[in-house]
Amino acid sequence: MKKIFIQVFAFISLPCFIMAQTAIKAEMIYTVSGAAIKDGVILIKDGKIEAVGTAKEISIPAGYKITEAKIVSPGLIDARSVVGLSGALNIPTDQDQLEKSSPIQPELRAIDAYNTEEKLVKYVRDNGVTVLHTGHGIGALVSGQTMIVKTKPGTVDQVTLVPTAMLAMTIGPSVQSNFTSPGTKAKQIAMLRTELIKAQTYLSKQNDKDTSKRPAMDLKMDMLGKLLKGQVKALITVNASNDIMSAIRLSKEFNFKLVIDGAAEAYRLIDEIKAANAEVILHATMARNGGDMVNMTRESAAILTKAGISVSIETGFEGYVPKTRVLLYEAAMAVREGLAYEDGFKVITLNPAKLLGIDKRVGSIEKGKDADLVLYNGDPFEYLTSVCKVMIDGEWVSDNCK
Amino acid sequence: MRKAIFLVTLLWMICCNTQAQEKPTAFTGALIYPVTGAPIQNGVLIVQNGKILSVGGADSKIPADAIVTDVKGKVIMPGVVDTHSHLGGPEGGDNSSALNPDTRAFDAINPTSDGFKKALAGGITTINIMPGSGHLMSGQTVYVKMREAKVMEDLIIVNEKGVYGGMKMANGTNPMRGTAGFPGTRAKSAAMDRELYVKAQEYKKKIEKAGKDSSKLPERDLRLEPLVEVLNGKRVVHFHSHKENDILTAIRLSKEFGFRMVLHHLSEGWKVADEIAKAGIPCSVIVVESPGGKLEAMDISWTTPATLANAGVLVSFHTDDGVTDSRFLIRGAALSVKAGMSRQKAMEALTINGAKMLDLSSRVGSLESGKDADFIILSGDPFSVYSKVEQTWVEGKKRFDLSNPVDKAFAVGGYHAYSADRAEYDDNDGDDRDGNQ
């Protein structure tokens, strides 16, 4: 009986295992964590990378379905986006990235807004993005929380890697255009400091020996408290030099972990950023050079990398047409303007994975990591190259080169 | 005495010859894309006094006094024509009326705008600058060359029909504001257009009836005069249209009133390519990164330029700057090649096709003897991400040089490379998303 059971089980489960076992042969594999592999093979089993190496090193076991490609890279990771909250229709009912009822709302969760069915989620997936750091947008002092998702189809709970990743904040002219107050830069900082001091008090009262004196649960204070305790990072969108310095000053005063986002003028403050131990997510390379980004340069990724600052590139937020940028193209333009070729992959894979604290699972092609892969029919950065296939967790989720 | 006169004459000849007859410049060794002819390996381009003297192979005869510049390994192609841009801060009508044939972008543009540096860095030498799309008819457009300019007169280029601009029209959601004087529906939009054109037809008849007798001419009407130019085929209508039904409406209007038209943007152009081809309407297409951003652009596709060109439509590209950046117009053409357009057709769409749409093809859009010396020197294949525009020449003058650090900042950006004046990116047409497609 037991034998029969095993046979039946094997029979039923066999097709599933075959489905989950894939081998990819490629002319070049950019592992990102290690050297690029010429004539390489990747084995995928149960959604994970089973092995990666040269065709000579790795023999493909029987039963593995083979797919061939010119170039393979890890799945791309967008370090900061609003896709899934800011929809393509661009009408009030599909714009959930910015709540304008108050300029400081740390309690807003991204997971309550993310729409896995959004057209742009599929669009960025078809263009190689497998992980999105998305959530509340720019334009409020504290617009809310961010989250990390895989772009694969499914419900929000099925695709979420980290439900609360960072606290999205902005210092700069966009805040003043969205709210009557703050109406000045000084007021922006004063309002932030006021709330953060309240959160400090909230935290210290929580430790009061007299339990009756402990404060009632306050969603806003609870979240700011997590920032002060170092449980989440502050993702502060700042572009002009003086605003970047304000963010650094705040992070010192309140001792929170700072990610400088946008960072159009970061190239002017290299020593200050290093001294503050701040991380950097750089604006889209082809962003419009208007407003507080007027002094941006497309050489920023190259300049900061050369200076020893780890850079991640984002697509950020677009208010109109185009509604999102294509991450791969933004990295390509950084390579064109001086970023080393293989660093072009790093800024959209391993660097953001580290910054987001998910590098044990994603960001490079290594044994044991999630099988998130992108297959190309040529130099990934070239205008004429296409993303042909995309795999997430071992499953093909996109096929564009039929 | 006679000797003195001779000397003076000689001096005069020398002085004026150097003024009118500058030395020819020869560019040798490049891969030249004349566009109207086959590509020339190791070609020679010779220019003098703002015009092209000759374009040929390595055996070209180079004048003895020519300044020879070796550009071996580089690529030379005609200066790019941007058939739709908002650089320089153009304005058209205000909130008082949906139809503004009397307003001229000419009267608003800042000829010293540093936005034009973006165009030069992107290899663009000729531009159709238009007022926005927040009106059914937002006003007269301006055809300009990227010359060194102090006043608007330095920039404009009068075309083969004797005008230096077209007429901007738009349909679909942008002009449908539903406020006083503006349409709230598509049918009302078309009806308001037709009403104005009927008036223009009557005005034109009166002028024709008067013939040479100026006493019988109707009173001058600033709104109708430019529309008579439109009805006479002198002034081309540049019609902003996205959705297939709106595109077909624009074609219907152009047929009814017999005006010459270029369709612009065409998010859904791929759906009605055969109808556009049958009507013989040229199309100026925008290439953007992603769909959406507005309802009308949900079905936008990179295949549109290829689909239209393959259907036999004359296709050009535009930036709609600031919707896309003038520095990336050639990139848009490359993305269209990826989506199925032939390299030759994409090259034509960047240059000669746009020139034809602006009635400027006898002067610009290709490298041919006698044409304006508008050309760019690239580091490599125009459709490669790694190629850069190294030099941009307008009428024989070098207007952009990547090896100059100041010019390089126009290409890549940097501290104070551009002014912070937001007016550059605003066309102030009363639409909260103006200047946009």
Image (spheres, rainbow, N blue to C red):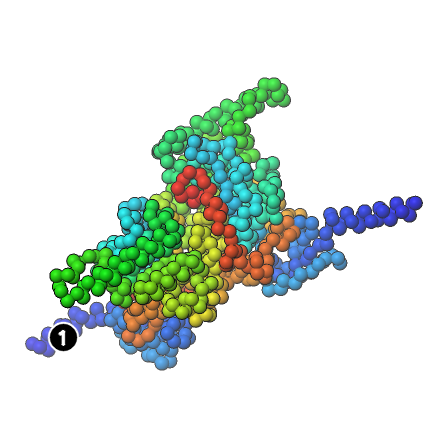
Q: Is residue A129 left or right of residue A231?
A: right
Q: Residue at x 52, y 49 (%)?
A: B115
The front one of A374 and B420 is: B420
Q: Is residue B225 left or right of residue A95?
A: right
Q: Give the residue pinned by disc 1.
A: A7
Q: Quadrant of residue A213?
A: bottom left
Q: Residue at x 17, y 59 (%)?
A: A215
Quick one: label 1, few (<14), some, or many (20+) residues within 10 Å? Answer: few
Q: Is residue A340 left or right of residue A232?
A: right
The residue at the far top in this view is: B215
- Kindly tell me whether residue B144 is visible in this rendering: yes
| Quadrant in the picture for the N terminus of chain B | top right
The residue at the far left in this view is: A1
Residue B389 location, x and y as percent?
55, 58
- Kindly tell me whether residue A378 is visible in this rendering: no
| Quadrant in the picture for the C terminus of chain B | top left
Residue A288 location, x and y as percent?
44, 53
Q: Amino acid at mark 1?
A: Gln
